[in-house]
Amino acid sequence: MRNIVALAVLGAVGFSSLAHAGNAGSSLGDCYNHVISVCNEGAHPIPCAEDGMDACDEEHSASISMPKFQIKALRKNATRSIQIGRTKPATRGN
């Protein structure tokens, strides 16, 4: 199930934007923030965000030059934007 979520996140985020991590000011933090934004639109933002940020880590691994504690702090900061329990308004069928 987690692999399906990760693939969905990569599709929504746009794999090509992740693959070109070094271009146009793209950064690990930007990737995290974009993933959180996309995942907040779904029904299960926490697993989506975890899988998406893992994908960011993998895609940016070659260009990351900061210590792990800074990466953890960056990730923790991004997760503060996860919207838990948000429900979409119900629509009436008429």
Image (cartoon, rainbow, N blue to C red):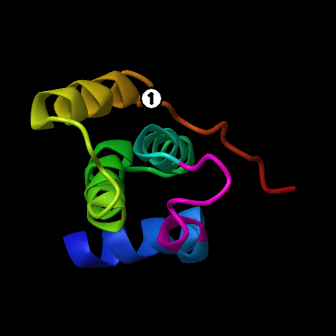
Residue at 44% across / 25% down in the picture? 81
Answer whether residue 35 is magenta in the image.
no
Q: Is residue 55 in view?
A: yes
The answer to whether residue 31 is above or below residue 69 is below
Q: Is residue 1 in view?
A: no
> Which range is magenta?
17-26
Q: What crowding class fits label 1: few (fewer than 14 Cα within 10 Å), some (14-19), or many (20 or more)?
A: some
Apparent side of residue 91 relative to residue 21 in the rendered image (left or right): right
Q: Quadrant of the C terminus?
A: bottom right
Residue closest to the eye, 94 or 83: 83
Apparent side of residue 15 relative to residue 28 in the rendered image (left or right): right
Badge 1 marks a residue whose secondary structure is loop
Residue 93 drawn at (x, y percent):
79, 56
Question: Which residue position is annotated with label 1?
Answer: 83
Answer whether residue 18 is magenta in the image.
yes
Q: Give the prevailing secondary structure in the magenta stretch.
A: loop
* Type of amino acid under label 1: Gln
